[in-house]
Amino acid sequence: MGVIKYASKWNRQFKKWETPEHDEKFRSFAVGSYLPHTDIILNSSEPEYNYVIISYGFRVEDHSNDTYKINKYEFFIDRFVDYFMNNSKSNYIVRYVMLDADAPLVEEAKKLASYIDNLASMPGTKSINVVGLSKCGAINMYTPKYFKNSKSYELTHVYNIATPYSGTTMASPLYFYPKIKELVTSKLGDNTISNFIYKKLVDFYESRSSNSHMDYDIAKPGGVSEDKKDNYDEEFIKNIFSDENIEALKKIKGFENFTTHIDKDVIKKAIQTGDFNTIGLCILNSWFFDKKSDGFVLTSDQKLIENYLDVKSTDLASSHMIMTSDSLDRVLESINKNVENKQRTRC
C-alpha cells in the first residue's frame, strides 16, 4: 500500500504552485511512498537509501479515493516494490509521482527537480533512479536543467521508456482527426453514416483526453488548435533537445533509453487474454503507425535521443503503458545492476 505524502497544486490563474485544498489534491502533483526494506533500514546503524522514482503520467484521482493512500497497485508498481524487496540486498525506497492535471509539463519538470534536490540533500541518499514512461520520459529531459543541488547530478540516473521525443499524433487533434476521417471514409465512403461515426469517435477521443497540458504538451508541433493554447505549450516538444537540456543530462550519473513496440506475441497474448486495452493499441499501431509503434509512439521516434546523447536504446517488445512483466524486469534489473555496481565501486 502506498501512502501519499506530498502534494502541490498548479494555480492556472497566477501561474504558480500552491498548497492544495483537499478537493484539489485529487488533481495535484503528489508522491506515493513505498518502503520495501523498512525493517532493514530501521535496523541499520548507518542506513543507505536508493530511491526509485516512478512516473507514469497519471493523477492522484486515477489511483486514490481519499488522497492519502493509493488503494491499489496499477501499471506494475507492485512489481517494482516486490522486485526490490525480494531480489536485492540494497535498501530501496520506491516512490510514485502523480502529475498535476493543469500544470505545463515544463513546470512538472521543475517540481520534480526540486523534489530530487531535496532527496539528494538528505543524509544516507546513495542513488536516485528516475523511471519515466511516455510523457514522463519527456519531462525527464528537462528535469536536470532545473537542479539547484550539485549532488542531484552526482546521484541521479534516468531511465526513459517509450518517450515521444518528437511528440505523438495521438496527442495532436489537428493531425489525429483527419486520420480518423480518412480511415472511416475509406471503409464506408463519404456519407451521413460515416460522418456520424466520425463524430462519435472524435467525441470519444475528447472524453478520454484531459484537454490539458498533460496531453497536449506532447503533441506534434502544430497539432493543437489555437483555441486550446491556454492548455498547450508548443515549445515543450520543440525544445526537448535544446543545448541546455542536453548539457544538463550529460552531467547526471547515467541515462538509459528503452523503446517499446507491438509484435506478434503482444497481439496473440492480448487476444488470448481478452485484453481490450492492448487490442486497441494493436489496432492503432496497424491503422495509424504502419505497424511501427507501440500503439502510441513510433519506435523510431523513441530512439531520437541517440542523436544527442551517447546512448544505445534497449528494445522492449511491449505495447505502450501495458508493459509485460518480462520486459519491465529488464528495466528493474538495469536499475539494480547500476546501484550494486556503484556500491561495489565505493567499497
Image (tube, rainbow, N blue to C red):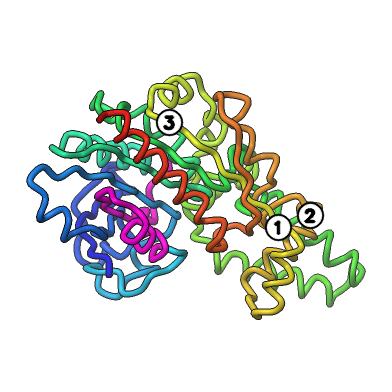
The image quadrant that residue 46 belongs to is: top left
Q: Report the Cα–Cα distance between label 2 and label 3.
A: 31 Å
Q: Report the Cα–Cα distance between label 2 and label 1.
A: 8 Å
Q: Nearer the viewer, mark 3 or mark 1?
A: 3
At 68% from the left and 72% from the top, the residue drawn is 269
Verify whether residue 43 appears in magenta.
no
Return the residue at label 3.
254
Q: Amino acid at mark 3?
A: Gly
**Image location (x, y in percent) of residue 188:** 90, 72
Answer with mark 2 or mark 3, whichever residue precedes in sequence. Answer: 3
Residue located farthest toward the left when viewing the structure as drawn:
45
Q: Is 113 placed left or right of 316 in the picture?
A: left
The image quadrant that residue 123 belongs to is: top left
Q: Amino acid at mark 1?
A: Ile
Q: How many numbered discs sit on the rendered protein?
A: 3
Q: Which residues are magenta?
A: 77-105
At 31% from the left and 53% from the top, the residue drawn is 29
Does dot 2 land on a helix, a strand or a loop? loop
Tell me the quarter of the image containing the C terminus.
top left
Tell me the number on the disc at residue 291. 2
At 24% from the left and 50% from the top, the residue drawn is 91
> Badge 3: few (under 14), some or many (20 or more) residues near its Cα, within 10 Å?
some
Return the residue at label 1.
262
Q: Report the Cα–Cα distance between label 3 and label 1.
A: 27 Å
**Image location (x, y in percent) of residue 117:** 24, 35
> Badge 1: few (under 14), some or many (20 or more) residues near its Cα, within 10 Å?
many
Does dot 3 land on a helix, a strand or a loop? strand
Whether pointer 2 and pointer 1 mark residues with C-beta atoms closer than 8 Å, the reply is yes
Q: Amino acid at mark 2?
A: Lys
Above or below residue 196? Residue 173 is: above
Verify whether residue 81 appears in magenta.
yes
Does dot 1 land on a helix, a strand or a loop? loop
